Structures are given as structure tokens and as C-alpha cells.
Amino acid sequence: MPHLNLSAVNQNLKLYYEIHGSGENKILLIMGLLTEGAAWSRQIEFFAAKSDYQCVTYDNRGCGRSFAPLFPYYTTSQMAKDALALIDHLQWKQCHVVGISMGGMIALEFALLAPKRILSLTLLATHAGGLSGQAPFAGINHILQSMLLRDENAVIENVMAMLYSKKTLADPEKRKSFYDYHIERFRKRIPPSLSGLIGHLAAVVRHYISYADLLKIRYSPFDCLIMVGTEDRLVREANSYMLQRVLGCRLIKCDGAGHGLQGECVEEINQELFKMFESVRKNDSIKKSDTNISNEHQTEILALEQCCQHRTHCLVYDIIGFVKGLFLGMILYSSLSIVGLTKTQLAGIHLTFESVILLACLNGLRRSVACVFRIFRARQFVKKHHLQLDRATHQGGIGITLPEKSKTGIPSDCGFEFPIHSLIVIANLIGIVYWLRPYGQKI
């Protein structure tokens, strides 16, 4: 099967992909963390047998037979551009997009990047990012073990416990079937490079789709479907309910299923996907062609645009600001040391370790204060336009129904929460600056 040579925009990578079937209805299957596209085998088998369908699977950058950039600075938006380059190469005008786990995160970014290229969007066991998107402790433990274990049997047992529910693994027949499947994949796999491993983990940790961007997906002209297992150890089940609430779409709950839905609930997944694709093909979708945003809905989006537009949670964004300031200060300090300046000379120009910390604090404070300012600006906008937002709810939009007895007029879980995380960062940074007070008096 071929490789796609990506352009300089995509870092000149080679992306391995496989095409199955030859029908007019196109399906893009996006796999998750450090997993090859071949893991969609049961869906490939199902749709390739249908003459009306054609699907493509591929190995994400840094995984399998695709190349890995040396610098592991991956993002899910960058990986969505890889997927877009692939369907451009295949000359697909539109396609159904299906993503699981990290693949679902990439699919969300794809929906923002090229909404007109999507016929339908299906999200399996995924999340929009932020603090609530971080994996449960049990999931983190399994991920760490998968990196450290070397014994073949121990690796497979850990993978199965991570992907499948206890109920499924308690069935001897199913357990043997999954064990044989994973042992075969393990022996044939191409181990990821260090840059690929770090890159994938970095992409997941940094992934964040804001409430405003989720609304843009809601108002896009394609249907969405969410599927989640009730015993998922890697992605919290509640994340899927949040996505369903904001996207206003259908949610399928797979009782007693784990994270590996595409393998554990094969028949249910395949039938639900087929039902979704057929409804689009027959022009019987839930969303109709007229998806123009009403004035009330537009007001809601304008309110959300007053908020932070960076693609990470505010807490992560603020801490990264501190780390970047620290990094830049250390580079400056090290550079001047290399050119021959002694510690006494560096102190003479007020460049000491304390000044490096101070620079980091100032950069972190700059970001934190900006986040607080933007959220308060958005909250004031919501208070001012609350009637329009309330009407948006009654007209079928996601809207924001203001509670009758609310002290602030700002409902919870709507994207306008009080900026407690940024305020905590500000308090801590001010504490560090206060600790550096004696240094400031010496300058």
C-alpha cells in the first residue's frame, strides 16, 4: 500500500495509508494514540463488503509505517491537517469522518478545519480536552505500564485490561479471541520512535476544543454521533455526555464496554455507523440544509468569542507561560555565561537566578491576567444579552437558559465559569514574586 508525501506545511512527512472498497460513499477512519490504522479491521471488513462504500485508514504521524518528525511537537490540529491532505490526495470532495480516542480529537479538529468536506462526524470514546479530558488514574497507570513492560505476555494482558471491560475479559472465548488478536499485532508492529511516543502524548495533553468551537461544529451542516463505553478506563464517560449536550447530537451508550469500542462492540458500532451513513445517503439526516445561524445563536457565539481563544485550558496555558519565561531566562543566562561573563559580572547587570525566576513569573502573570480579563469581559457580555441567549434555547439552539434565582446571572457549565484556575495561578506567582522581594531591593 502507498505512502503519501506531505507538503512542507505538514513537515514533508510520509503518511502510510490503505484504501478498502471502491464505492461512492467515502469513509475516513482515524485511529487513536500510538495505534495503526489496521486496528479498524472489523469496520474495514464490514464496509469493504458493501459495494457502495470505500474507506481509508492510515497511520498517524509518529506511528506504524508513517514517518515521525524529529521534533515531537505534535498537536491534534496539526494531525487533522495530515488527514485533510490525505483526502485531498485521494480527491475526495466529501467523506464520513469517524475517530476513536485521540482519533476523535483529531476528528473534532478536522470538523473545525474543513466542515464542508464532512458528510457526518462520529466520535467514539473521546473528549474535547481541558482538565476534564485528562485520563483517570487507572488509565494513566496502564499507559505507563505499556511503556515500561517488556515481557510479551505482560504487555498483552495490560493492553487488554486497558481497552476492554472486566465483563468481556471474564468470557473465556472472548478473552482468547482478543489475546490472539493482540499477540499477532504485537509481533508484527513497528515500535514507535521516542519522538513519536512523546509527540502523541503531547498532542493528547495539549488537545483542547473550546466551547465556542464546539458550537461552530454544532451549527455545521452535518450530523454527529457519539458513542461511549460505560467502563472506559482511558476517557471519562462524562466527557461524551458533555459533548452530546453541546453538539446537540445522538449518543449511544455501550453498556459494559471499555475503551476499545471498535473491537469490543463490533456489531453495534458497525450497524450504528451504517445507519448514520445511509441516512445521509438518502438525504434523511437530522440536520437540514439550512444551517444559517440565527441572530440569537450568533449572539451566543459573539459572547464566547470574548473568551480566551487559545487552544489549551487556561490553567495549562498560564503554566506554559511561566515555563516559557523560565526557559528563555535560562537560555539568556547560559548564553552570557558561555561568552565569558562571570557570576559577578552577571550580577552586575542584575542577571541572576532570581531574575530568571522573576522573568518567568512576569510572563506567567501576563497570560493569567489576560485570561481573567477576557472571561470577565465575556461574563459582562452574557449579562447584557441574556434575553437573546434565553430565546436561543427556546428556538432549538444550545442557548443558555438563565436561572430565575441566580446571583450572578451566569449559569454553570456554559463556557463562562468564574476564572478560578487563572486566579490561583496569579496568587501563586505573586507569592513567588513576594519571595523574591529581597532580590528586588538589591537592584
Image (spheres, helix red, strand yellow):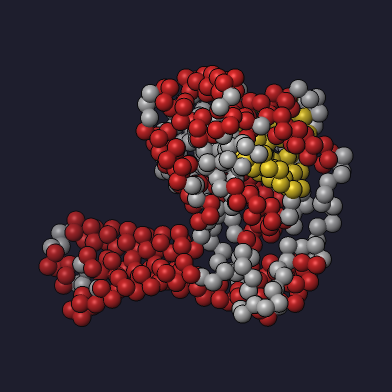
Q: How far from the left and from the top, in percent, is residue 101?
A: 58, 41
What residue is drawn where x is 28% and y is 58%?
331
Indicate the position of residue 325 as horizontal and vertical percent values. 35, 63
Taking the spot 52% from the left edge, 41% from the top edge, the residue there is: 233
Residue in the picture at 75% in, 77% down: 387
Q: Quadrant of residue 402?
A: bottom right
The percent position of residue 431, horizontal first and vertical second, equals 32, 73
Q: Position of residue 127 (x, y in %)?
A: 59, 49
Quadrant of the snapshot with the N terminus: top right
Residue 51 visible: yes
- Horizontally, residue 13 falls left or right of residue 406, namely left
In this rendering, position of residue 43 left or right of residue 281: left
Q: Report which quarter residue 260 is drawn in.
A: top right
Instruction: Give the image quarter of residue 279.
Output: top right
Relative to 365, residue 40 above or below: above
Q: Nearer the viewer, residue 93 or 319?
A: 319
Q: In this view, does 243 lie above or below 125?
A: below
Figure check: 246 above or below 283: below
Q: Which residue is drawn at 62% across and 29% down?
A: 263
Residue 78 visible, this angle: no
Count the marks: how many? 0
Q: In this view, does 335 lie to the left or right of 270?
A: left
In depth, the one of 425 and 132 nearer the eye is 132
* Quarter of the rendering occupied by the C terminus: bottom left
Q: Which of 253/149 is in front?
A: 253
Along the line of sight, which residue is nearer the eye, 46 or 21? 46
